[in-house]
Structure formats: C-alpha cells, structure tokens
Amino acid sequence: MRVFKFGGASVKDANAVRNVARVLKKTGCQELVVVISAMGKTTNALEKIVDSYLQNDSDLKERIEYLYQYHLTILKELFENEQHSIYTKVRDLFSDLSTTLDRNKSRQYDYIYDQIVCYGELVSTTIISAYLNENELINDWLDARELIKTDASYRDAEVDWERTQRIILDKINTNGLTITQGFIGSDTNNFTTTLGREGSDYTAGIFAYCLGADSVSIWKDVPGVLNGDPRVFEDTQLLTHVSYSEAIELAFYGASVIHPKTIQPLQRKEIPLFVRSFLNPDTPGTSVKKGQPLEPYIPCFIVKKDQILLSLSSLDFSFIVEENISELFGLFHKHHIKVDLIQNSAISFSVCLDDKFDQFIGLLPQLKAKFRVSYNTGVSLFTIRHFTEEAIGSLEKNKEILLKQITRETYQMVAK
Ligand code: ADP
Ligand code: ASP
Ligand code: MG
C-alpha cells in the first residue's frame, strides 16, 4: 500500500487537477490511498464564512456564493457536459453548508468552525474523484469523517488510534484506488472535527500508520524539502536525505513544508516519507527515513512568523521556579498556546509562543495577577539547524534581535 497526499496548491485549478491525474497515471494507481486538501485557499475563505456567520455580517451569502462560483469555474473546465451528476453533487454540498449554518444553535466557535471548514475538503475530493473516474482512474470516494475518529477538541482534535485503525482496515479496499479528505475526522457523536490547519499531511501519516503502508508521498509545489522556505530565503538547496528526527525538528521549528505531526506515526512503523514535486514527478525529491544522515549536510533556515515573545518576572523578586513554571505551562496547554522556545533566569522567564487560536489576550489578566508581564506580538522566530558562523551572520544582518539561544545543533533567535 502507498499513501499520497495532494495539498491545496496541487489542486488549485482545473489544470492542477488534470496534473494530479497525470501524476497518478505515471506512478501507478492501485493499492493506493490519496488524501486531498481543499482547493487553493478555500479553507481561508471558509474561515471568513464562519466569521461572517458569527458576526451576523451581511456579506455571508455573498461569500458562500463566491466560493461556489470558484468551484463551478473549475468544474466547467473539467466537465464539459453540464448535465453531469457532479454539478448537482457540488451544488448539494454548498446547500448543505448553508443548511448547517441555518440550523446551528451553538455559539461555540471551534465547533461551528469544524462543521463548516470541512466542506472545502468534501467538495474538492468529490470533484477530483469524479474527474478521475471519467479518466480511467476508477476510485472509491470515502468520507474521512467515517474513518478517522477523534476526541471532541474541535480545531485541534486528537486521534483515537485504535478505533481509527480498526475502521480503516475494515473500510479501505487495499487493492484499489481510494480518494479521501485530509484534515477532517469526527468525534464519538459523529460531529466533524479537524486536525489543525495544514493537517492533511498528518492525515496521510494516519492512513499510512493504520494500513502499515510501504510509503507516503506528499506532493508539493517545491522540489522537496529545501534548506529554507524559498519564499523567504535566497539560494535554497534541496535536502535529498533527511532522518525522521531531523524532519521532526525542522517541522517543529516551522518548516511548513511538512506538518509537524506527520512524522511520528511514520517513524513508529518506519514508513518512509517522500516529499516530491507535483510539477516534476520524475524527480525523486526528498526521502525521510530512519537514521539516514542529512544530505547535503548544510545549515537549514526556518522562520516562524507571527509569534509572541512573552517575558514574565516575579512581582516580589522571588525566584521563578518549578512551581510557577509548571503552572504557566498548564495555562498555555489549557489555552492551546504552543511554546516554541524557553529561556529563564532566577527571576524572569521568557517564552516564544505560537497563539494559533488567539487565546493569549484572554490569558493576560491571569498572568498579570501573578507576574510583571511584558510582551511583543508579531515577532518572528528564526532557527538554524546545523548552523555555521557564516549562516548566523547572514541571518542576523539588519534585524532587531530580542532573544537568542544556541545549543549544539540549533541556533534560535527571536526578532522583530
Ligand atoms: P500544500 O499545498 O501541501 O498545502 P504547503 O503550501 O503547505 O503545501 O507547503 C509547500 C510550501 O512550503 C512551499 O511552497 C514553500 O513555500 C513552503 N516551505 C516552507 N519551508 C520549506 C522548506 N524547508 N522546503 C520547501 N518548502 C518550504
Ligand atoms: N485545507 C486545510 C488547510 O488549508 C488542511 C490542509 O490543507 O492541509 O489548512
Ligand atoms: Mg496547505
């Protein structure tokens, strides 16, 4: 069995969808599960729809219609016959979305979010499955919400591995071609859950783990994992070989080419991961496997934007010790705030935080009750794995550095 994952960029328009079919024809399409994300920037558009709904904005209907028209344009390019049943299916999905909003009684943002953003993946896979069926790539479309079972932590759900594995082994035809959605699952009450933004890579990892797959390939708009995000850094180079532990470090510090949760399930069963270019499917890309040395062995640059640098010091010059630190981490955990970097001294404590769920401001009064608090928002966390003096020099140039930390393999800095 192999598992493939195609992300938003690889299915952003009709040409991209045609290219997916070409890749599948080239690589073979039996004994294959293909996990697909929402098309292009659809998830962002759905997030705006949720916001409009909750704020009673007058543009709600317009936003839904706009997203429908975007998909309709792709449909018209892919299916000339406008009587094809896919047109009804896609229209029905959009009317389900509107009905879900009309009937909703909850005011719980995270819950509503998951019930709505899932439509991006449902629509994209419905279109692509139909297109592949029309083009000799006969496939089964499966609803990932019936396969991936999670807890009810909406927007950041935890997988119930045992149940998920049992269902996946039962429902997937391991000989054929299965098309399913990334990012989404469901809780014990069958409400939709999501695995966190960019979570489709993780879905591929979940399927691979449960099926004991031979490999996972995630198809990207870059040649593979590079030693820096090409949108940010110049003259980036392809990393051809990476170990699981290196990949986890890179992803954790913010190399957004792989979702950080993807690696662990693969590593547990030693399933190789390939990061490959959907534009050049003949090139090997990057392989991620157990224990292989980084090749080429060069500094890797990572930037995580929109972080918060929080510094706390005690109000009465008492030490900041285990007890306060454990309480602080308890609070961060409770508020789904991720800690990327820690630095402490006797009476002060600094952390670089990733506040994906906009919870920090709500937490501030609790912090201020106990500590002297200062913070900077909108800062960037820069990391260099396998740094050299030259690499540090080039990164630090023209930056206002707020904090710096160096360990054996990793240089980190927070800057404005
Ligand atoms: P998907 O279409 O699967 O959602 P993403 O857009 O999430 O793909 O990931 C691909 C993008 O990741 C690339 O276009 C690139 O800008 C960015 N990226 C960040 N860090 C790296 C890196 N180290 N190597 C390659 N690409 C990277
Ligand atoms: N569509 C989701 C997102 O944009 C999941 C993914 O693409 O991986 O976050
Ligand atoms: Mg993506």
Image (cartoon, helix red, strand yellow):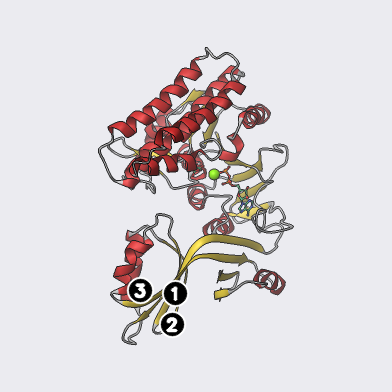
Q: Given the image, on which type of amino acid does mark 2 rest?
A: Ser
At label 1, which amino acid type do we have?
Ser
Residue shown at 69% from the left, 71% from the top = 388
Q: For the residue marked with disc 3, what is the amino acid?
A: Ile
Q: Is mark 2 on a helix, strand or loop?
A: loop
For label 3, the crowd category at 10 Å Cα-Cα, with few meaning under 14, some 14 to 19 and many 20 or more, is few
Q: Mark 2 points at which residue?
A: 345
Q: Badge 1 is on which residue? A: 350
- State whether label 3 is within 8 Å of ligand 1: no
Question: In the image, which disc is placed on residue 325?
Answer: 3
Res 177 quadrant in image: top right
Label 3 and label 2: CA atoms lie apart by: 12 Å
Q: In this view, does 307 lie above or below 396?
A: above
Question: Vertically, is 172 above or below 287?
Answer: above
Whether residues under marks 3 and 1 lie with C-beta atoms below 8 angstroms apart, the answer is: no
Q: Quadrant of the C terminus?
A: bottom right
Q: Can the viewer see residue 253 in this picture?
A: no
How far separated are the C-alphas under marks 3 and 1? 11 Å
On the image, the x and y values in percent for residue 313 come to: 38, 80
Q: Which residue reaches farthest bottom?
A: 317
Disc 3 is placed on an element classified as helix
Q: Residue at x 68, y 59 (%)?
A: 233
Give the answer, above or below, for where 277 lies relative to 140: below
Q: Does the residue labelled 1 lie within 8 Å of ligand 1?
A: no
